[in-house]
Image (cartoon, rainbow, N blue to C red):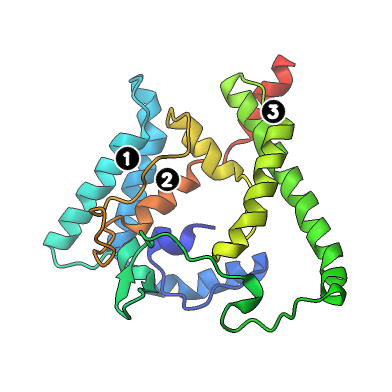
Amino acid sequence: MQIKDFLGLQMPHVPEHYLQKVAALAMALPTINVGDAAIGVVTLGILILWPRLGIRLPGHLPALLGGCAVMLVVNLLGGDVATIGSQFHYQLADGTQGNGIPQLLPQLVLPWDMPGSNFTLSWASLQALLPAAFSMAMLGAIESLLCAVVLDGMTGTKHKANSELIGQGLGNIVAPFFGGITATAAIARSAANVRAGAHIAGCRRDPRPAGDPGAADPRPTALLAATVGDGRPAADGGMEYERGA
C-alpha cells in the first residue's frame, strides 16, 4: 500500500498484516498532508489521463514534471512536503548525518557480526535456518518467474528462467554481506517501468550531486507513491500473454 506516502499520513508504525494496516490508515486519515495529497493526486491523474491524449510519449515524464510543479507551488505557499531526503537518514563514517539514499558503497560486514545480531554461526544454527531459507528461496523464485511471465505478456518477449533464478540467487547470497536483505522481482514496479517505455531498471536514480552525501534528496514521496501505484493493474499483461499463447 502506498496510501501513507500518497496522502502524507503521519504513521510512526505501519502494521504488517493487511486488516490491521487498513485500520491504521483509517485512524491516520485526520493527519493528511494537503501538499502531499495534491502532489499524489496530480501525478496519478496525469498518469491515468495522459494515454487518452494519443501522444506517444509515456505519461511518466509529464507526471513527474507535474508533480514537481505542484511541489514548487506548495513550497512557495509555505507548505510542507515530505521528500526522500526529509524522511530517510543514515549515519556517515565521520559521525555526520546523511539524507535520503546513501551514495557511498556499503562496507563488507559478516551478517552475524552486525550490531544487535544475536546469531551465532554454527552447524546447529545452519540446520535450523535451512527450512526457512528453502521456503524463502522457493517463494522468491515463484514471485520472480510470475513477474517475468506478466512482463512477457506486456512486451511480447520471452524470459530466460534459468538466468533469472541464477542472478536472483547470487544477488541474495551476496547482499547480506553488505547490509542488504533478500529481494525478488516485483510486478508493480516492473509493470510501471515497462509502461514508461524503459528497457532497464536504471543507471543512476539519485538526483543529488555526486560526492555530496549530505545533500537532501528532493524527490517527493507522494510522487513516487503515485508512480509505483500506477503499476498495480498488471494482470492485463498476463491476459495478453495467455491470448497470444
Q: Nearer the viewer, residue 99 or 225?
A: 99
Question: Vertical placement of 139 versus 22: above or below?
Answer: above
Closer to the chain start, of discs 2 and 3, is 3
Q: Which residue is mark 1?
A: 63
- Residue 32 in view here: no
Separation (CA) of disc 1 from disc 2: 8 Å
Question: Vertical placement of 241 versus 46: above or below?
Answer: above
> What amino acid is at disc 2?
Thr
Tell me the residue at 64%/24% (across/down).
153
Separation (CA) of disc 2 from disc 3: 27 Å
- Image coordinates of residue 106 in percent, x first then y, are 46, 63
Tell me the residue at 37%/28% (across/down).
58
- Image coordinates of residue 11 in percent, x first then y, are 46, 75
Tell me the residue at 26%/67% (across/down).
214
Tell me the element at label 2.
helix
Q: Can you tell which quarter of the image residue 215 is in?
A: bottom left
Tell me the residue at 26%/53% (across/down).
210
> What amino acid is at disc 3?
Lys
Q: Residues within 10 Å of mark 3 (few under 14, many from 20)?
A: few
**Mark 1 or 3, which is nearer the eye?**
3
**Mark 2 or 3, which is nearer the eye?**
3
Q: Which residue is mark 2?
A: 227
Q: Residues within 10 Å of mark 1 (few under 14, many from 20)?
A: many
Is 133 on the left-hand or right-hand side of 217? right
Q: Nearer the viewer, residue 146 or 175?
A: 175
Tell me the element at label 1.
helix
Q: Which residue is mark 3?
A: 160
Closer to the chain start, of discs 1 and 3, is 1
Q: Nearer the viewer, residue 174 or 129?
A: 174
Whether the residues at callouts 1 and 2 have beta carbons within 8 Å, the answer is yes
